[in-house]
Image (cartoon, rainbow, N blue to C red):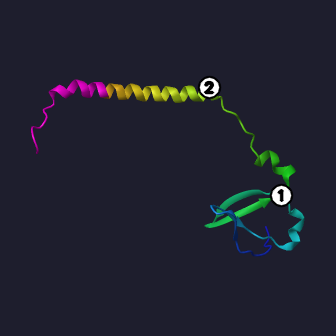
């Protein structure tokens, strides 16, 4: 890796509640304008490093992971099973409390 220059990170505000960090590269990199950059982050020796990779053909398979659709039905089934178990637990607690309520002495008048 070699040093290519310094740039102050500025910001771009396309909307009032949206801010993007903006970095300007040296003019000799004008040929990459419009290309897709793959961004990698690393932290070595306590310093954050950001690397841009422009060779899409070499890194496309490695960088862009395929979208895998989850089986919606099985996801819902699992979520429902968890909810049903929690409802059973709550029902058990309520029934225990209702069963014990007659045996609990309630204070008479202000304490």
Name the foreground residue: 7 vs 80. Answer: 80
| Residue 45 shows up from this direction | no
- Which residue matches tag 2? 73
- Which residue matches tag 1? 54
Residue name at image x 29 percent, y 24 percent:
95
Residue 27 appears left or right of 17: right
Q: Answer above or below: position of 75 versus 28.
A: above
Q: Which mark is residue 76?
A: none
Q: Are marks 2 and 1 in contact (CB under 8 Å)?
A: no
- Quadrant where the C terminus is found in the figure: top left
In front: mark 2 or mark 1? 2
- Quadrant where the N terminus is found in the figure: bottom right
Element at label 1: loop
Give x and y (percent) for residue 23: 74, 69
Give x and y (percent) for residue 17: 62, 61
Residues rendered magenta in the picture: 94-111
Image quadrant assignment for residue 99:
top left
């Amino acid at each position: 890796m070699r040093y290519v220059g310094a740039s102050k990170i500025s910001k771009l505000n396309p909307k009032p509640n949206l801010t993007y960090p903006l970095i300007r590269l040296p003019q000799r990199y004008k040929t990459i304008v419009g290309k897709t950059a793959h961004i990698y982050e690393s932290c070595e020796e306590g310093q954050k490093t950001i690397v841009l990779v422009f060779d899409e053909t070499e890194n496309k398979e490695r960088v862009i992971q395929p979208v895998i659709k989850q089986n919606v039905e099985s996801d819902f089934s699992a979520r429902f099973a968890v909810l049903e178990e929690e409802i059973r637990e709550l029902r058990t607690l309520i029934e225990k409390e209702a069963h014990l309520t007659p045996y609990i002495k309630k204070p008479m008048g202000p304490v």
